[in-house]
Amino acid sequence: MNATPESEAVPAPPVVPTDAEVFQRLATGRARIATELGKVIIGQREVIDQILIALFAGGHCLITGAPGLAKTLLVKSIASVFDLKFQRIQFTPDLMPADITGTEILQTSGDERRMQFVPGPIFAQIVLADEINRTPPKTQAALLEAMQEHQVTAAGVRHPLQEPFFVLATQNPIEMEGTYPLPEAQLDRFMFNVVMEYLPAADEAEVVARTTSGAAPKLQPLYHGGDVLRFHEFVRKVPIDPALIRYAVDLAAASRPNQPGTPEFVNESVSWGAGTRAAQFLVLGAKARALLAGRAHVILEDLQTLALPVLRHRILLNYRADAQGLKPDALVRKLVESVRPPAVG
């Protein structure tokens, strides 16, 4: 029998890491990523942690913060660390759905004419939707459909997006005139609402010193898209006590007014509370947070820490609460205090 020519040799199958190896990569990842991002990003540790948790859990983020807080640099840097294709889309009032999803154009070759789909900027792996509330609802809906379905439909043909696919949408909380606020049903598609605050004076001084002296250092990729997809699968394997799942459900349910067992302060201040997706994201986020902390199980602190980014954009305050100056964050903190934690071993 003739030997198979070397050029026709069957390639070796890819090496699939074991669960123990994936756990180790996740457990050590937080420090490695922080060190790499620290070359260009100063502070914002809590913001970075929340974005990483969402990335590992397979969720999207809404980032609320004033202009000039390095939101674009942060997202672009995370894309570099994970070696993912990055695309920034500036949302404006005249932006049309086809401007982000792509469109079909007529191609002519000799006597032959045919329609060809030209992908839009949504065909990336990390998409920064800058100032999403500046564009009309029809364009917002096109982005949110891609977020939910991980595909774009043009002329009846479905075009899958490259995995992993992750959207970070920003909002400016200061200038609301001429904007199109996202309705509650669309806000619910975002796993987290991450709030970026101004840096402390010492950190801000370091930012100014770094950005006005020399070129920014180049970040080295630590992972790739295949790693992120494996992280998505592994996060869902993390065990969680059923009592903690019930706690996540109770926390979301307590935000709904006029329901049995709802706290009185919720009935007085809330028009609409969080749905089931909030409890799902609380549990998924808690699993990812546990792994980043080097734990193979969820604890109560994981759920309570993520209550703010999960719930703050899912609770609609009423006119009475607005008149009293009550903010969603204050109400979520009060919810965490009022819902009895479970007794877990």
Image: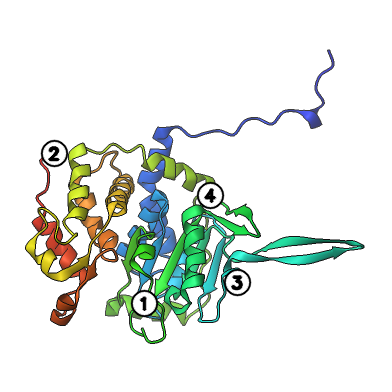
Distance between the Cα atoms at labels 3 and 2? Answer: 51 Å
Question: Who comes first in sequence, dot 1 or dot 4?
Answer: 1
**Residue 294 versus residue 211: which sits nearer the camera?**
294
Residue topped by disc 3:
99
Residue type at the position of mark 3: Asp
Badge 2 marks a residue whose secondary structure is loop
Question: Who comes first in sequence, dot 3 or dot 4?
Answer: 3
Q: Which mark is residue 225?
A: 4
Distance between the Cα atoms at labels 2 and 4? Answer: 36 Å
Indicate the quadrant where residue 243 lies. Answer: top left
**Residue plotted at (29% across, 77% down):** 202
Distance between the Cα atoms at labels 1 and 2? Answer: 44 Å
Query: Which circle, 3 or 2, is nearer the viewer?
Result: 3
Distance between the Cα atoms at labels 1 and 3? Answer: 38 Å
Position in image of residue 185 (x %, y %): 36, 63
Q: Residues within 10 Å of mark 3 (few under 14, many from 20)?
A: some
Q: Residues within 10 Å of mark 1 (few under 14, many from 20)?
A: few
Residue topped by disc 1:
206
Residue topped by disc 2:
344
